[in-house]
Image (cartoon, rainbow, N blue to C red):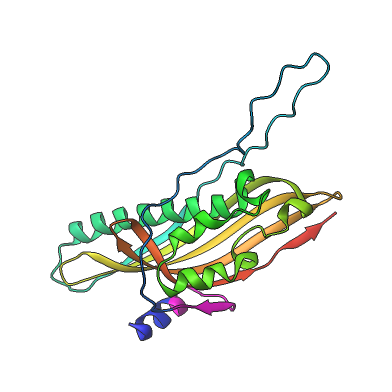
């Protein structure tokens, strides 16, 4: 399996970076966290002299699948079955990674208060422990509230390869994510955020979960 993972990563154009937890097993999360696009706010007291500022909102974001392909476990599986199941797996992976990146970079309630705990539910086994120890790599950062006023925009693409077993059922996938966003800095100017990652995923009763990853950051400040 490790040989296949390395081969798939090479074919997907994996970037140099951090490789962790390429085969760990562990307790799966109970559920994937729901998204919140705005920071929770208390009901303001009535005032005749001032009004509370509007809460920050997360910019609109969804990963776009630029390329996807199945790796068939058997040539006897019907092409229509392969296409249908691959399409379904790719759609689920796109949804999961979109949710994870929103929570990691875009939702004000998370980055304003260094509350990134929900993103680790997208990881399983040893990969979850590794993700917890690399918060700065995988998120906007523990000091994001001091560095940034808001995240202005975001977009990203996915390349996904799905490995199917002999019965034509997806059981492993590798997704290469290229995420970019623009954040306004507290002291003026902007930072162009970029996260390039390869994620190794397996399906579970809780959706597709990450059991290994390789991520590289290429953030760039601008005036």
Task: Choose top left, top right, bottom left or bottom right for residue 222.
Answer: bottom right
In this view, the residue in front, 137 or 176, is 137
Question: Which span is picked out in magenta?
Answer: 9-21
Q: Quadrant of the C terminus?
A: bottom right
Task: Choose top left, top right, bottom left or bottom right for residue 207.
Answer: bottom left
Using the image, determine if residue 149 lies above or below residue 123: above
Q: Residue at x 51, y 75 (%)?
A: 14
- In the image, taking residue 22 as reference, residue 115 lies left or right, namely right
Using the image, determine if residue 16 lies above or below residue 122: below
In this view, the residue in front, 162 or 2, is 2
Q: Where in the figure is residue 161, as x and y percent of width and height?
A: 37, 67
Q: Residue at x 86, y 50 (%)?
A: 187
- In the image, taking residue 50 as reference, residue 16 lies left or right, namely left
Is residue 114 inside the magenta stretch? no
State the residue lying farthest toward the left. 76
Q: Where in the figure is residue 201, as x and y percent of width and height?
A: 38, 67
């Amino acid at each position: 399996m490790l040989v296949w993972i390395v081969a798939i990563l090479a074919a997907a154009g994996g970037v140099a970076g951090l490789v962790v937890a390429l085969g760990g097993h562990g307790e799966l999360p109970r559920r994937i966290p729901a998204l919140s696009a705005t920071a929770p706010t208390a009901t303001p007291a009535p005032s005749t002299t001032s009004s509370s500022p509007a809460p920050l909102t997360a910019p609109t974001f969804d990963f776009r699948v630029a390329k996807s392909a199945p790796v068939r476990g058997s040539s006897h599986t019907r092409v229509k079955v392969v296409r249908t199941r691959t399409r379904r797996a790719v759609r689920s992976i796109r949804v999961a990674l979109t949710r994870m990146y929103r929570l990691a970079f875009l939702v004000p309630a998370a980055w304003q208060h260094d509350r990134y705990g929900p993103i680790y539910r997208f990881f399983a086994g040893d990969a979850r422990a590794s993700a917890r120890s690399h918060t700065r790599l995988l998120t906007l950062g523990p000091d994001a509230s001091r560095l940034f006023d808001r995240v202005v925009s975001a977009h990203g693409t996915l390349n996904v390869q799905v490995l199917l077993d002999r019965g034509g059922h997806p059981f492993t996938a590798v997704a290469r994510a290229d995420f970019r966003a623009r954040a306004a800095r507290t002291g003026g100017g902007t930072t162009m955020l970029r996260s390039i990652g390869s994620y190794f995923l397996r399906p579970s009763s809780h959706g597709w979960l990450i059991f290994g990853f390789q991520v590289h950051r290429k953030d760039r400040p601008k005036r």
